Amino acid sequence: MVRKGCCRWYCYHCANGRLPFFDFSFATVGTTNFSQGLPLACVSIAFCENKRPVMGVVYAPMTDEFYVAVKGYGAFRNGVKLTHRTSVPLSKAVVEFEFGYPRSKDAISKMTSTVQKFMDKGCLATRQLGSGVLDLCYVATGRFHCVYSGVAGEGWKPWDYAAGLVIAEEAGCSMESFRQKPGEPFDLYSDTIICAVSQELLEECRQILAKV
């Protein structure tokens, strides 16, 4: 099905006399986890047209999970289609975050106080895994309900976003930066991110993050 989607998408552009600009993003994500022997690391590959990802492939070898998505054709984990997630309020949400590597007192204060704000608002639980792409895949599967990063300069890079963006959106999730207008396309060069199972939950998170 994925192969058929790629072929149809490419033939459509060629038939309309437009050969698209292609680019690739390839990365190993979760390198600290990998170097420490932790299983939450993966290879991430994105296929882009005009700097927008249209296909994402993620493989986590130590958990043997293979994610793939093509824009307009859905997202899959180990061959099983990821269905759209049911929206949940923040009070029932598992919130994932990444602290990254900033170590200044101001950055540490911002990162830890933000987690406290989510807990003060009554979120169900918080987690930190250390692999941005897997964070997005886990929101797509419903293991987490939202993930954020970027409150203190610890935001991700384009290769952290690209494949996960296609997988998350094709699974029905919403992904935006803190400061963009609702509904605008996510910018791969953004230094902040919120990804949630629904736009409603994303907006709840944005209200907290806007006050950081």
Image: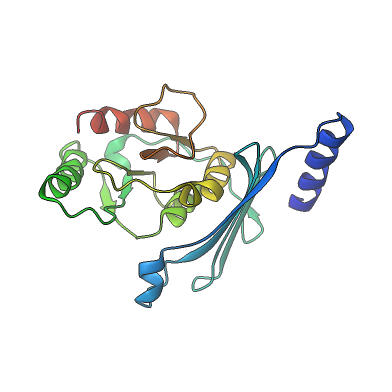
Q: Give left or right: position of 89 versus 164.
A: left
Residue reaching furthest to the bottom = 37
Residue 11 position by quadrant: top right
Which coloring applies here? rainbow
**How many labels, in total?**
0
Of 145 and 72, the residue lying toward us: 72
Position of residue 143 measured from the top left corner of the image (x, y, whole percent) = 42, 53
Residue at image coords 35%, 39%: 192
**In the rendered image, the vertical position of residue 162 relative to residue 50, given as above or below:** below
Residue at image coords 17%, 42%: 110
Position of residue 65 measured from the top left corner of the image (x, y, whole percent) = 55, 65
**In the rendered image, the vertical position of residue 36 relative to residue 116, given as above or below:** below
Residue at image coords 15%, 39%: 120
Asked if residue 157 shows in the view, the reply is yes
Of 57 and 35, the residue lying toward us: 35
Position of residue 195 measured from the top left corner of the image (x, y, whole percent) = 42, 40
Residue reaching furthest to the right = 15
Residue 67 position by quadrant: bottom right
Asked if residue 75 shows in the view, the reply is no
Of 202 and 182, the residue lying toward us: 182
Position of residue 38 measured from the top left corner of the image (x, y, whole percent) = 37, 73
Where's the C terminus, which quadrant?
A: top left
